[in-house]
Amino acid sequence: MRCQPRYKGQVYIWLKNKQHCLLCNEPSDTSQSICTPCETELPWLGDHCQACALPLPEAGLTCGQCLRDPPAFEQVIAPWTYSFPIDSLITRFKHAAKWPYGRLLAELLAQSLQHHFDEGLKPPDALVPVPLARKRLRERGYNQAAMLARWLSDSLEISCDENLLLRTQDTTAQQDLDAKARKQNLLRAFALTPNAQIKGRHLALVDDVLTTGATAQSLARLLIGAGAARVDVYCLARTPKPGELT
């Protein structure tokens, strides 16, 4: 006995639906919500520092700041520089709850990371989103870094661990401070959760933008100090100006 009725008509399949590009609104020629011309014109990160991903004039170099004081994290992976239209897409995702933009950027970041893995980069044991301050989380209603980490986890089949880090203090927004103030702002801002499993693990911090690297540096130091074997940083974009990591 069949519990489902027979139906010989055409069935609507969502995955075969033609999408429109989120940038130009023209029909997309790919399976994603961005067309090939718009994707090509994105501000892709070119030659950059091997550690912090700061844009540099030649490949295979390490910036002066990272040579003077090597960061606690091993490597930053970022597909783009923080310029138009990436800056606009991130801002709309982060502050206006335009989640389709975030999902698209996460898909493209996952493709970039998979390429690095295919080229020999070792995948991490877990993705760890940068925690958001409680006050800002209440105001915004979501943590954009956690959303990115979950989408990356689904695409790359790497576990997402949101229970390792805590933001213990509500601090001034980092973009409103200079490099020295950023460092002071982050003192004692983060902590490990009770019974956090850190020792011997290769972890990757996930965030939207790396500016001076102060947040990534603070969290990497915390994780390495707790016994992590390696900490990488995965983010959507890197600002094109140098900053102080320490």
Image: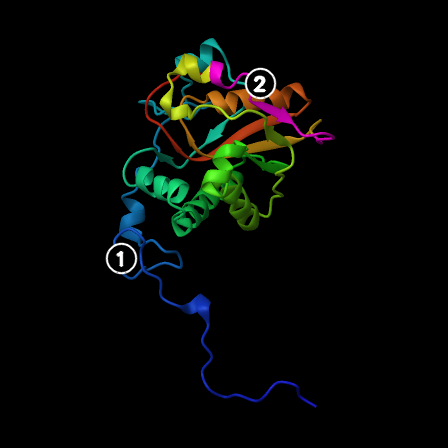
Is 24 left, or right, of 62 in this rendering?
left
The one nearer the camera, 40 or 85, is 85
The one nearer the camera, 152 or 101, is 101
Give the number of marks: 2
Give coordinates of residue 29: x percent, y percent: 32, 60
* Mark nearer the N terminus (1 vs 2): 1
Dot 2 falls on a residue whose secondary structure is: loop
Give coordinates of residue 140: x percent, y percent: 45, 41
Magenta stretch, residue numbers = 184-197
Please say whether residue 10 is one of the residues in the magenta stretch: no
Question: Is 117 situated above or below 191?
Answer: below
Say which residue appears at 48% left-offset and 18% top-offset: 185
In this rendering, which labeled residue sits more in front, label 1 or label 2? 2
**Residue highlighted by disc 2:** 188
What's the amino acid at mark 1?
Asn
**Residue highlighted by disc 1:** 25
The one nearer the camera, 129 or 54, is 129
Is 56 left, or right, of 24 in this rendering?
right
Dot 1 falls on a residue whose secondary structure is: loop
Magenta segment, prevailing SS (helix, strand or loop): loop
Is 55 left, or right, of 158 in this rendering?
left
User: Mark 1: few, some, or many residues within 10 Å (few <14, many ≥20)?
Assistant: few
Gap in angstroms between the C-alphas marked 1 and 2: 45 Å
